[in-house]
């Protein structure tokens, strides 16, 4: 039972790590990877929590959710990458410009 | 044919009805509303040469489907539809009540306006990209408003976000690309917060259906975490102060019809989910969180208003006005009574229509003069009387003056704040109205100043001017005929009984 929560905690840890990287790093590639790490963390939480009790087969619904989530995550990453390439072509930089805080 | 007797008599009874009523009653409009725009989007993608007529046709068809759904709801009350016949615990349910109906109706109405406006706005090459994306977005919106499954809501939220980002990137130039990229990252972050919250809710109660969750939910640390995560994600997407930082740039740098779309409908989608969750699942969270939302909402009203006053460009002014108006929606949370929810929903409705008209007017000005610097507007606006009328009429609702939808909304919220003895929220309503008056008049005053034309203004298609004006007139009608939308909200009593 306890190892289930270990995996879930690991997932939350990945989520937090990704969130930190998303905010701290300026390079867009790192930001996109950070979003991917975050979503992997969420998927790990979903899969880990699907086995409620030892001996009983795990609940299949979270697996279906994870598969759907992966599809969404792939399309989002593709869109982010193409936007990054276009931005690079337009500005020559791989970073978002600093704005004055408002 | 051997009908069982019960079904046979039922069948005979139905045959006596007029064919029109038979069609209206039998067709599952709730499903058609989702499938139709998605199919239309694919058709536009496959046949780019006729995408404009396909898009307009789909928007018209969506309006008539909303009418059909409204007819069904009025006859039979709130409606639940099990996709594929699987039913709630395992399958995905669609659910429509007064709240969903109002959201779908405003999306269809503003959507038709945006379709008509866009049919003259985009050049051929851009139009080929615009129509499929817009119809997908329309389908995502309808699916979001009609879903009763919190994971399905995540999927629609992502579809909505991705299409919205792609639409922002339609405008050329590095400014639009930068805003699109920032918008995408914010969107993904918000969605992942929401999804993690969904994971906790599912683990705790073993269901994704909102109605089932509403019965099973009870306070526990996991639920608190879920409420926090889901609210944080949705507030980020709704751009509630202080998480509004991404909104003005994204909304101002998009093409005009897309700005209208984002400000009128897309930010409202995440607010709708929050509202739905708050009404059904979160009543346990208690009063302090509601007070916090109210405080943030008030801060948004004032800060957005002040920032709108300080802008030098028209589209940024209108975008900051959105930040301010979104704040009003959150004033209903601390009041928490049926009349306050109705006020917030009415505010949402009238703001959607008014802001669409305002962004279209700003788009016309930008198209005619090539710039939207507020200080140099005089020479442009004098040639666009219809556009300026549209802007001023929409401004009446944004300020909350009678007769307009914004006035009715503020009236309901004010009444709720007095009834519940929390008059200070009412004070925020009045202050926000004053600020709105200041920034609207800053623009409108330019029509009264004489200025010689510095350069030749370009022709603006009449259709673009008239669309803005018609939408602005709709807001005024919302103020005059308020009883009809208010009765629509009552179906299935989403806000609980009593007033």
Image: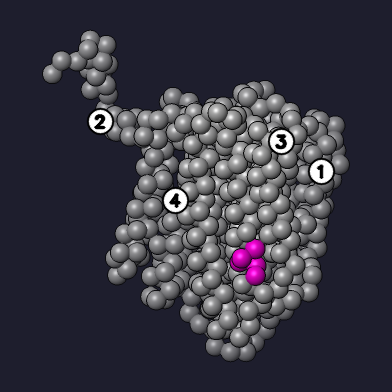
> Which image quadrant: the N terminus of chain A?
top right
Nearer to us: label 4 or label 2: 4
Residue behind mark 2? B19
Distance of label 3 from label 1 (alpha carbons): 21 Å
Image coordinates for residue B245, horizontal then vertical, percent: 73, 63
Is residue B34 among what the camera can see? yes
Q: Residues within 10 Å of mark 1 (few under 14, many from 20)?
A: some
N-term-proximal mark, 3 vs 2: 2
- Reading the image, the residue beneath label 3 is B222
x, y (%) of residue B125? 39, 76
Between disc 4 and disc 2, whose residue precedes?
2
Instruction: Let me know if residue A32 is in the magenta part.
Output: yes
Q: Which residue is mark 1?
A: B292
Residue B158, quarter of the rendered image: bottom right
Part of the protein shown in magenta: A30-34
Which label's residue is closer to the chain start, 3 or 1? 3
Labels 3 and 1 within one chain = yes
Disc 3 and disc 4 in contact, CB within 8 angstroms: no
Asked if disc 3 and disc 2 are in contact, CB closer than 8 Å, the reply is no
- Secondary element under disc 2, as helix, strand or loop, is helix
Question: In the image, is residue B115 above or below residue B455?
Answer: above
Q: Residue at x 53, y 71 (%)?
A: A81
Q: Give how far apart the Cα atoms at labels 1 and 2 are.
A: 53 Å
Front-most of B223 and B15? B223
Query: CA–CA distance between discs 3 and 4?
Result: 33 Å
| Helix, strand or loop: magenta stretch | helix
At a point 75% along the width and 34% down the height, the residue shown is: B221
Judging depth in this view, the residue of A64 and B156 nearest the camera is: A64
């Amino acid at each position: 039972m306890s190892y289930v929560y270990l995996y879930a905690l690991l997932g939350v840890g990945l989520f937090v790590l990704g969130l930190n990287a998303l905010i701290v790093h300026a390079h867009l590639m790192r930001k996109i990877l950070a979003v991917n790490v975050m979503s992997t963390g969420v998927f790990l939480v979903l899969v880990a929590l699907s086995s409620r009790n030892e001996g009983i087969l795990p609940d299949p619904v979270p697996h279906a959710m994870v598969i759907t989530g992966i599809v969404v995550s792939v399309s989002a990453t593709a869109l982010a990458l193409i936007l990054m390439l276009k931005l690079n072509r337009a500005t020559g930089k791989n970073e978002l410009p600093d704005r004055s805080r408002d | 044919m051997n009908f069982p007797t019960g079904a046979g008599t039922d069948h005979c009874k139905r045959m006596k009805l007029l064919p029109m009523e038979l069609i209206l009653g039998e067709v599952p409009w709730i499903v058609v509303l989702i499938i139709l725009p998605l199919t239309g989007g694919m058709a536009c993608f496959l046949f780019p040469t006729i995408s404009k007529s396909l898009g307009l046709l789909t928007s018209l068809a969506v309006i008539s489907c909303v009418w059909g759904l409204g007819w069904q709801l009025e006859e039979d009350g709130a409606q639940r539809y099990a996709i594929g016949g699987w039913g709630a615990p395992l399958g995905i349910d669609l659910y429509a009540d007064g709240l969903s109906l109002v959201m779908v109706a405003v999306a269809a109405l503003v959507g038709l306006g945006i379709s008509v406006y866009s049919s003259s706005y985009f050049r051929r090459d851009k139009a080929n990209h615009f129509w499929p994306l817009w119809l997908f977005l329309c389908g995502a919106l309808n699916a979001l408003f009609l879903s009763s499954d919190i994971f399905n809501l995540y999927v629609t939220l992502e579809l909505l976000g991705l299409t919205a980002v792609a639409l922002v990137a339609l405008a050329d130039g590095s400014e639009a690309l930068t805003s699109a990229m920032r918008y995408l990252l914010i969107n993904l972050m918000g969605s992942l917060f929401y999804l993690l919250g969904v994971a906790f809710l599912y683990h705790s109660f073993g269901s994704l259906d909102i109605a089932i969750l509403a019965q099973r939910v009870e306070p526990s640390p996991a639920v608190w975490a879920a409420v926090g995560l889901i609210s944080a994600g949705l507030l980020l997407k709704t751009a509630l102060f202080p998480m509004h930082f991404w909104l003005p740039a994204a909304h101002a740098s998009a093409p005009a019809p897309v700005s209208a779309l984002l400000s009128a409908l897309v930010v409202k989608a995440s607010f709708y989910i929050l509202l739905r969750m708050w009404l059904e699942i979160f009543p346990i969270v208690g009063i302090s969180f509601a007070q916090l939302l109210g405080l943030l909402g008030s801060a948004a009203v004032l800060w957005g208003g002040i920032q709108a006053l300080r802008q030098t460009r028209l589209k940024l002014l209108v975008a900051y006005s959105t930040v301010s108006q979104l704040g009003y929606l959150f004033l209903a949370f601390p009041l928490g009574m049926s009349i306050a929810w109705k006020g917030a929903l009415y505010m949402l409705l009238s703001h959607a229509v008014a802001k669409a008209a305002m962004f279209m007017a700003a788009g016309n000005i930008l198209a005619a003069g090539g710039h939207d610097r507020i200080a140099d507007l005089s020479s442009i606006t004098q040639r666009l009387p219809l556009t300026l009328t549209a802007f001023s009429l929409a401004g009446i609702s944004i300020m909350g003056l009678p007769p307009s939808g914004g006035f009715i909304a503020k009236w309901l919220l004010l009444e709720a704040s007095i009834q519940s003895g929390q008059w200070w929220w009412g004070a925020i309503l009045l202050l926000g109205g004053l600020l709105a008056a200041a920034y609207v008049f800053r623009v409108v005053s330019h029509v009264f100043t004489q200025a010689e034309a510095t350069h030749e203004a370009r022709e603006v298609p009449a259709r673009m001017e008239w669309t803005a004006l018609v939408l602005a007139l709709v807001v005024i009608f919302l103020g005059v005929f308020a009883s009809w939308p208010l009765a629509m909200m009552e179906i299935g009593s989403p806000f609980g009984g009593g007033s």
